[in-house]
Image: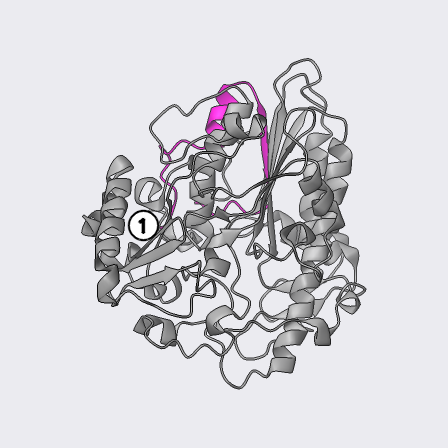
Amino acid sequence: MGSTMTSRPNIVLIMCDQMRWDAAGFAGSSIVQTPHLDRLAASGVCFENAYCASPVCSPARASWLTGLYPHAHLQLRNYGPKRMGEFGGYLPHDRITIGDMLKRAGYRCGIVGPWHLGDDHRPQHGFSDFWCTYRYLGDYPDPLFDYFHTEGVENLYRSGAPGMTQYGNILAFGTITDPRQQRTTWTIDRSLEFVQQQGDDPFFLFASIKDPHPLVLVPPDLPGRYREEDMPLPSSLRDPLDRKPEFQERGKFRIPSTVTDDEFRRMMTYYYALITHIDNQVGRLLNALEGTNTVVAFMSDHGELLGDHGYTEKCLMYEASVRVPCLLSWQNHLPSGFRVTTPLAGVDLMPTLLSFAGQTPETSIDGRSVAGAILDGQEPERQPIFAEIASLDAIYHNANNPDELAAHVMIIDDHWKYVRNRFDIDELYDLKIDPGEMRNIANRPEHQNRITQMRHQIAEMVCRTGPGPYAWCL
């Protein structure tokens, strides 16, 4: 299973899609059952304050893989087959990913699950040894859907599949009737095929898990583990958004008033049940890696609002949308049970994983490796955290004005969060006294010097590898 004849470790990157940072036992939840991930956290490093570089799938994934913010990698909104060749719609081929680097370093590289960065049917960016992607394939065969057909089980992920429940516009959920119908199970099955291939070279596996992104489909025994009456409704579920940017009042996934508290709690039981299913499946992969020289990273591309500020899904700069779970484990190398409070940026994981393989980025990137610090059991040096995203109109309504593809920038420095909004009022939150981000204090006179300083920090950041489409921040 690779890496047995060399000191270079295997590297397994497990990336979920749309998992809340706090929806796990290791993150402090007394409700969500994640025993396998809890053990992974206990055996390694838990980043308690990890942030994505963009709270939407494709741009966030591109940042995790390249160490660049969106202004530099130019994947500015979600990829779909019709967007190949469009500015901002795919990851340019000349951007260097961790897959490119590790392949050139002699690693056997494979991906299972969504790529979501362009030409998803075509092996690329170093993943030439095992390319097993699904979704976003356009006219090309979809391996997951073909699997359902070959196995003779109904494809519950297709549009209009029966048995789904959806209240208003919140996450649609349902149960499978056959274990073969669940996409995370399929992803781990294929991942095990890759890691069990024999070879002398170390391997890099990118296990891209689409869950718990909707559709929320779970085995029938799991929702019963969660009682609706135990589901804690967010305190900001009915946030009136006073003094907030106007665009937030009309977002696609603003929860309508017709959705009742009981309906929302019912949906939450399925979302948490799906995370337990992810945990069960990841546990299978962790068991297969037991005793090997393997770095394991577990995280999510971005978060899930799950009712915060009256929203589900993501794409806003609130904490639940930009914060993510993030674990690193490397037996006999990384300290056990080490909880890092220093924020980890969505561009820092790529150079950190490269460091474990004895590699450094070939070109200038935005991220920094924290490998040296955490290997020594030390907190990394504290630095500001940034995120960038297109407008909601560009993400959900196909607005094609280039300005719409670079519409919001966030900075977190200590306990202050500032969001510069290109087409609306700005936001400033003091996370120390207002962790729920209910009071936008950007218009208060006493904070204008702070806002000026944070604008300068944003300008310095985008100029480091850009500014690209974020020149408006200068």
Taking depth in this image into account, of 103 and 37 the one nearest to the observer is: 37
**SS majority, magenta:** loop
Q: Quadrant of residue 433?
A: bottom left
Residue 290: x, y in percent?
Answer: 76, 31
| SS at badge 1 | loop
**Left or right: 158, with 147 as reference point:** left
Residue at 36% x, 36% y: name it: 366
Magenta-span inclusion, residue 368 = no
**Left or right: 36, with 201 as reference point:** right
**Left or right: 274, with 323 as reference point:** right
For mark 1, does the 10 Å Cα neighbourhood hold few (<14), some (14 to 19), or many (20 or more) residues? few
Residue at 45% x, 43% y: name it: 346
Magenta-span inclusion, residue 116 = yes
- Which quarter of the rendering shows the N terminus? top right
Magenta region, residue range: 88-117
Which residue has dot 1 on it? Answer: 86
Seen as rendered, the residue at the extreme top is 5
